Amino acid sequence: MDPLIQTKSLKKYFKTPRGPLHAVDGVSIQIPRGKTLGVVGESGCGKSTLGRTLLRLIEPTSGEILYNGEPILNYSRTQMQEMRKKMQIIFQDPYGSLNPRMTVNEIIAEPMKVCRTVPGRQELNDRVLSLMETVGLAQRFVNTYPHELDGGRRQRIGIARALSLDPEFIVCDEPVSALDVSIQAQILNLIMDLQSSMGLTYMFITHNLSVVKHISDEIVVMYLGQCVERAPVDELFEHPAHPYTQALLKAIPVPNLSQRGQLKGIIKGEVSNPINPKPGCRFASRCPYAAAVCTECDPAEKEAAPNHFVACALVK
Ligand code: SF4
Ligand code: MG
């Protein structure tokens, strides 16, 4: 199936006083229309930067982004504005990402006003109410402010806003991580229901392995800006091939990858520095199988099984 969105060797380096920080370092992925690509990795591995770069909210340093087969990196501002309607983002923190001085109505209506996609006032109000219904938010909240609502309802506002321009592709950046566990499943189910009713394509970023297993068709495992393994979800969980993925999946209970240092004891060694990294495998400082060949050059991605790609020098 042709991918809706695809990247080729996408890189995003940030300038720092000590040298370039390789936040995203040569990531090639593709997401078929209507499917979910889960992106999993520890805090700071570049997941969010990848999601934002994909939408050109951050400009990449190099590489390619193709949308429906079209390279979008040379699109003009006007072309990109049109494109943005199709590509939206749901943020992790519904508390921080909603303007506290705007009502639910104003927040959901804003993108439609800016892009002038709905002609009149009445149509706009009707559209807001219909979006609220779509995301399961009662109409009585239409004139309330975000702080008057609980986390789940606030995230529903964020989702309604993301849907307001009829997107095809949504980056979901840790959309349930800030929510109470009791509410997480409701929001995940909403996100999955919307996908099947609206044919949406998702990149779903999370540090939570159970969430990613539940929601994804395919998974990418990131380590220090690079994609170390990608495979269909069952294949990845049954036959993890990269030593980093193997270590993550061996750890029970599943570690909380959002907290730095959580993997100490599970994965020995220090995380290497993403600023000006040395050539070779980034995981070598922690890998029990590290050999001389691992530090000579970056391990190339190989297809270990159909659609199962691994970047490890020891995987043939
Ligand atoms: Fe470990 Fe070497 Fe594979 Fe890196 S390339 S994961 S150091 S075995
Ligand atoms: Mg993040």
Image (cartoon, helix red, strand yellow):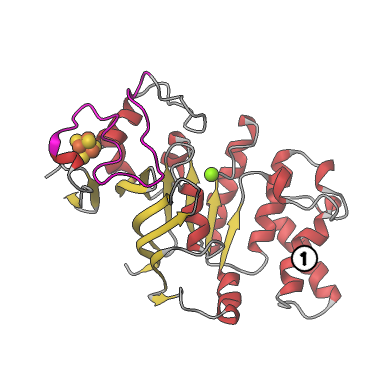
Q: Amino acid at mark 1?
A: Ala
Where is residue 242 shown, x and y percent of the image? 25, 38
Where is residue 300 shown, x and y percent of the image? 20, 51
Against 55, is 49 above or below? Answer: above
Residue situated in front as seen by the camera: 244 or 166: 244
- Classify the position of the C terminus by image quarter: top left
The residue depicted at 71 percent of the width and 45 percent of the height is 96
Where is residue 54 shown, x and y percent of the image? 48, 62
The residue depicted at 24 percent of the width and 50 percent of the height is 309
Residue situated in front as seen by the camera: 263 or 85: 263
Q: Main secondary structure of the magenta part?
A: loop
Does residue 316 appear to the left or right of 121 in the view shown?
left
Residue situated in front as seen by the camera: 194 or 75: 75
Q: Is residue 314 visible?
A: no
Whether the residue carrying mark 1 lies under 8 Å from ligand 2 is answered with no
Return the residue found at the far top: 265
Where is residue 176 shown, x and y percent of the image? 59, 40
Does residue 195 appear to the left or right of 20 in the view shown?
right
Q: What residue does disc 1 label?
A: 109
The residue depicted at 37 percent of the width and 47 percent of the height is 276
Question: Ligand 1 is found in which quarter of the picture?
Answer: top left
Q: Is residue 298 visible?
A: yes
**Badge 1: residue crowd in 10 Å (few <14, some 14–19, many ≥20):** many
The residue depicted at 36 percent of the width and 35 percent of the height is 272
Return the residue found at the far right: 143
Q: Which residues are magenta?
A: 265-292
Against 295, is 226 above or below? Answer: below
Against 187, is 84 above or below? Answer: below
